Image (cartoon, helix red, strand yellow):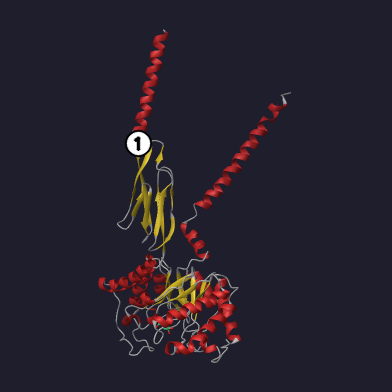
Amino acid sequence: MAPLEKRLEPYVLLLSLLFLTISYSVSRGGDDERTQPAYYQLEEAILESEMRRGINIGNALEAPREGEWGVYIRDEYFRIIREAGFDTVRIPIKWSAHADINPPYRIDEDFFKRVDWVVNKSLEQNLITIINIHHYEEIMQDPFNHRSRFITLWRQISEHYKDYPETLYFELLNEPYGELTDEKWNELVQEAVETIRETNPTRKIIIGPTGWNSVYNLKGLVIPEDENIIVTFHFYTPFEFTHQGAEWVSPSPAVGRKWLGTEAEEKTILDELNMAAQWAAQHGNIPLLMGEFGAYSKADMDSRVRWTRFVAREAEKRGIAWCYWEFCAGFGAYDPDKGEWRIDLLNALISEKHYITVETEYGNALGAGWYDEGSYALIRMNATSWGFFVFDHFEGLGPRDMVIDEGTVEIYVDESKVIKAVWIIDYVKPLAVALICVVACAAAILYKKLRS
Ligand code: BGC
């Protein structure tokens, strides 16, 4: 009979094999997680509440009564918006039509319930949800007599939503203008922020400049000292194009103006966006939101699509979050009668994603995956030498791609691309090995000779 150790040998071997297999598959599982396509990482980032791309549900709660302007907010709108790829919804609200005219300016309870329902549906879809005070025309004409009502509205709203998730944002007032001069508006902003902070110490508060939230009026805006402020502006340049045939503008700009994307047309837009970005940079890189932009349906669809794509991408390049004006009314990206998106407008907003692939013979490259059109894919070699080979350069780069350092490159995403890593032989290594061999052989021969 063989000794015990000998008999156990096959089992020990089997067990070791099993152990090796398990640990290999566990470590592979980890690898898979690390190399998930960037697209999924992006989706997670959105869930962690980064505001980038949003849409206004306009003409609903900012009408004197919801439904009067043709839009009644439906449950499924938020799922439709979320699934299309938006991360934010802005809900304009005419609180002033649902609160007493006299002190204590009580907001109607049923109206609060309706807003609660809307806000909850939106938050349930993981959408950052902005509520504001919209169309408070009286305060634009007579700020002095409406100051205390405005502040009291915010006291009630902020008390009511104080326990809501941090993904609910407050925007103080849509498009201040008229008698609400820079000076008066800045005072009101300060007071409103202090009021909100009594109950909501860290909630994001959005404020915008006078002149209907014009970029040109940013210079007059005083930002309260507070870490959770976002600054908004609205963008409808050129107004004669975006508002052609608009019934609520007098005189209404003539219909028929196109936006072709000529160099001059683009420059007008870039100048204004640069102005906003520079202002933000000079103010501690304060986050910017382009809270409204869009072109009315009386303009031709091709021009609207071109304009919308250009403005959205250029804002993104400058790190400006945006909310399109608006979901399903006169500027609508969604057709509520057909129950479908106006696909060209949607694509102009939520651009297509493209796949960036990296081919390499040695080592492996990180960063392959799905990326948004107009973004940059960061591709990095995880090792730049492999045996006798060293990484030399990437092949397939375009004029907008940027080499960051040896083995790292930023690829501009405008279509699906294959990037190839080119490796060359490192002649020093084989030569060194050959030299060592020669020396060793010579030494062996010499040794043999000396022995004989
Ligand atoms: C107004 C809307 C208008 C839009 C574009 C918004 O701020 O509230 O009534 O349609 O701007 O002019």
Q: Position of residue 333 (x, y in %)?
A: 43, 77
State the SS at label 1.
Answer: loop
Residue to which mark 1 is pinned:
426
Q: Say if 168 sits above or below 357 in the image.
A: below
What residue is rendered at 41% in x and 71% in y? 349
Amino acid found under the numbered disc labelled 1: Asp
- Looking at the image, can residue 26 be seen? yes
Return the residue found at the far bottom. 102
Dot 1 crowding, Cα within 10 Å, few <14, some 14–19, many 20+: some
Return the residue found at the far right. 1
Return the residue found at the far top. 452
Q: Splitting the image into 4 quarters, where does residue 341 fall?
A: bottom left
Q: Where in the image, quadrant-wise, is ligand 1 located?
A: bottom left
Q: Position of residue 416 (x, y in %)?
A: 38, 58
- Looking at the image, can residue 338 be seen? no
The quadrant of the picture occupied by the N terminus is: top right
Q: Position of residue 121 (x, y in %)?
A: 57, 75
Q: Say if 449 sits above or below 364 in the image.
A: above
Q: Say if 66 sits above or below 371 in the image.
A: below
User: In the image shown, does 385 or 362 lie closer to the viewer?
Assistant: 385
The number of numbered discs placed on residues in the rendered structure image is: 1
Q: Position of residue 293 (x, y in %)?
A: 39, 76
Check mark 1 vs ligand 1: CB closer than 8 Å? yes or no. Answer: no
User: In the image shown, does 137 or 326 lie closer to the viewer?
Assistant: 137
What residue is rendered at 53% in x and 78% in y? 195
Q: Is residue 148 left or right of residue 18?
A: left
The quadrant of the picture occupied by the C terminus is: top left
User: In the image shown, does 182 or 17 lie closer to the viewer?
Assistant: 182
